[in-house]
Amino acid sequence: MDTKNLRDLTIEELQEKHRQYKEELFNLRFQNAVGQLKNTSRISVVRKTIARILTVVREKQQGTSISAGGMSVSSGGRGR
């Protein structure tokens, strides 16, 4: 899932996506352990997606946002 799309979701929706991807990761690991998983790269993709979701949730909780041109902090920070 694209980070831009994740930023459009609410925290509740992000938490639901996190739960869904954690469940998928569990299932992928289980399939891998029993030798049924054909596409092992999906594990890495899901792990990175979970990290993206958690990053966006943390940004929303702290009140920071990432603009297209770089990082902008909307609360706090030193102005130079």
Image: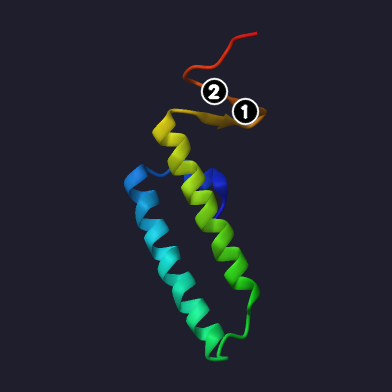
Assign a secondary structure to mark 1: strand
Crowdedness of circle 2 by 10 Å Cα count: few (<14), some, many (20+)? some
Residue at 51% of width from left, 44% of height from top?
55
Count of all numbered marks drawn on residues in the image = 2
On the picture, is 51 further left or further right than 63? Answer: right
Q: In the image, what residue occupies the spot 49% across and 28% down? A: 64
Residue in the foreground of this view, choosing between 15 and 13: 15
Q: Is residue 17 above or below residue 44?
A: above
Picture layout, residue 9 above or below residue 59: below
Separation of marks 2 and 1 at Cα, in angstroms = 7 Å
Direction from residue 17 to residue 5 in the image, left or right: right
The extreme bottom residue here reads 35
Q: In the drawing, what numbered circle is on residue 3? A: none
Residue at image x 43%, y 65%?
22
19 with respect to 54 (left or right): left
Residue type at tag 2: Val
List the single residue furthest toward the top: 80
Q: Residues within 10 Å of mark 1 (few under 14, many from 20)?
A: few
Q: Which three-letter amino acid code belongs to the residue tagged 1?
A: Met
The structure residue drawn at horizontal position 66% and vertical position 29%, both measured from the top left corner, is 70
Q: Which residue is mark 2?
A: 73
- Quarter of the picture containing the C terminus is top right
Give the numbered dot on residue 71: 1
Colour scheme of the picture? rainbow
Could you say where residue 2 lies in the image, as x and y percent from the top left? 57, 51
The reply to whether the C-beta atoms of the residues labelled 2 and 1 are less than 8 Å apart is yes
Indicate the position of residue 45 as horizontal and vertical percent values.
60, 64
Q: Position of residue 37 (x, y in %)?
A: 57, 85
Which quadrant is the N terminus positioned in?
A: bottom right
Farthest-out residue, left: 12
Q: What is the secondary structure assignment of the residue under circle 2?
A: loop
**Viewer-proximal residue among 13 and 23:** 23
